[in-house]
Amino acid sequence: MPNMSLKKTVMPEQAPNVRNKNFLEVATGYTEEMAREEAERCLNCKHKPCMEGCPVGVKIPEFIELIAKGDFEGAYQKIKETNALPAVCGRVCPQETQCEAKCVRAIKGESVAIGRLERFAADWHMKNVDEKIEKPLPNGKKVAVVGSGPSGLTCAGDLAKKGYDVTVFEAFHTAGGVLMYGIPEFRLPKEIVQKEIATLKDLGVKIKTNVIIGKTILIDELMDEYGFDAIYIGSGAGLPSFMGIEGESLNGVYSANEFLTRINLMKAYEFPNYDTPIYIGKNVAVLGGGNVAMDAARCAKRLGAENVYIVYRRGMDELPARAEEVHHAEEEGIIFKLLSNPTKIIGNEQGWVVGMECIQMQLGEPDESGRRRPVPQEGSEYVMDVETVIVAIGQTPNPLIKATTKGLETNKRGCIVADEATGATSLKGVYAGGDVVTGAATVILAMGAGKAAAEAIDNSLRSGE
């Protein structure tokens, strides 16, 4: 009989006032009993509406049914048929707006906890199974993948399974892209990412680090001199945006990109055991309201800041961050200064941040995005006492590949123009997807783009078109 509880099985977590002082994972995962209990809430619908919300087409009812039966390894293998990074997706994918949003159980009550169950299956496999992966027979074709983030890794994995000789080129010293430098350890342990990457290496994927495509090697050279038959560009959106206000060049001002890279990839949170220092004042302001802003604020709190503020020009209902991340941030003591917009960062004679001028906002008519436009309230200026400011208002693609590749079409935002269904660009044999095409988006959407491009590359090279 199905479990007709209207509530999801609660995910065990560290207590807020404990976890906001460490970088251990916040959610500790389901036990086997919890997983089976939650899996039994799935009605195994005939039309499988949840799958419509999954960018990589995971066979959701099938893997959940296997968990309900206690076949945890079977559930993992079912997920792996379409998803190259299940342990990652189970942790950071916004299921509440995708697969879980389509779940019929959400009509009356809460949806099935699809993401938590995906994480459980992946974690159970990593803990209990020493998998021996057989490399597919080579088909004689070579594909280069630029960037080892979620989009590039997905494309590489899908092509390797089809027998392609795949080489991934990564600019950093460690593979993983945004999964390594952008998402904090307490949301996505780096050991998990590296285990997922090790699985791809077992398939035969080669990863070359410290290689900057557009500088170390040009896109043209990958085909003309290195003999690759196709190229997939999944280099993400790593160029930070700033507000353009006075004081952004002061000491104590970070882009969220630099702040999180220092902490996550370069392990500043373990200083002095690691050689990467990072300055955190007593009072920290994070500008922005997305997931990156939440990550930066929660990291600052863990690094010892007494007061950490999210400064966002709209209200709570307009925050673009996942509801779960906002909830966790509130529990951990992050202070939300909403309907506020910074106008100037104040510095002292030594060039360090000592405060920030803001103005109160009110919401007017909807803008082109459909959200109500924030409008300044005249005479409502005030000053915040802060020593650190982290700017988390978005990222765009690095212009290096665009500037060094003739004939590669880009749009006014600097994103590569690519076919939505296939990832094909204006250059023959060159495909692109993920944040380098869409601008900063989610891990699972980037994975979906990598998956679609792998299929298109395979179709093209096999047909000879």
Image: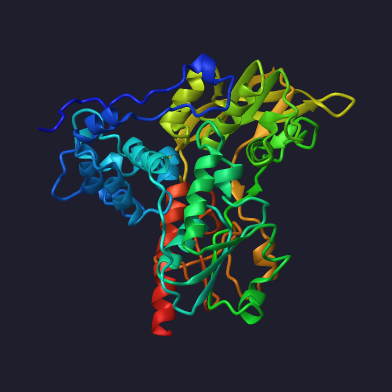
Q: Position of residue 99 (x, y in %)?
A: 30, 44
Q: Position of residue 408 (x, y in %)?
A: 60, 71
At x 71%, y 17%, the residue is 282
Q: Is residue 458 left or right of residue 21?
A: left
Q: Is residue 420 visible?
A: no
Image quadrant in which you'd find residue 180: top right
At x 39%, y 76%, the residue is 459
Please determine whether, in this image, residue 101 is positioned above or below residue 412: above
Q: Is residue 32 left or right of residue 138?
A: left
Q: Position of residue 356 (x, y in %)?
A: 72, 24
Viewer-side residue, 141 vs 374: 141
At x 65%, y 56%, the residue is 398
The quadrant of the image that shows the C terminus is: bottom left
Q: Is residue 349 left or right of residue 10?
A: right
The quadrant of the image that shows the N terminus is: top left
At x 51%, y 37%, the residue is 188
Extreme right residue here?
Answer: 349
Q: Is residue 78 visible?
A: yes
Viewer-side residue, 340 vs 34: 34
Q: Position of residue 217 (x, y in %)?
A: 70, 69
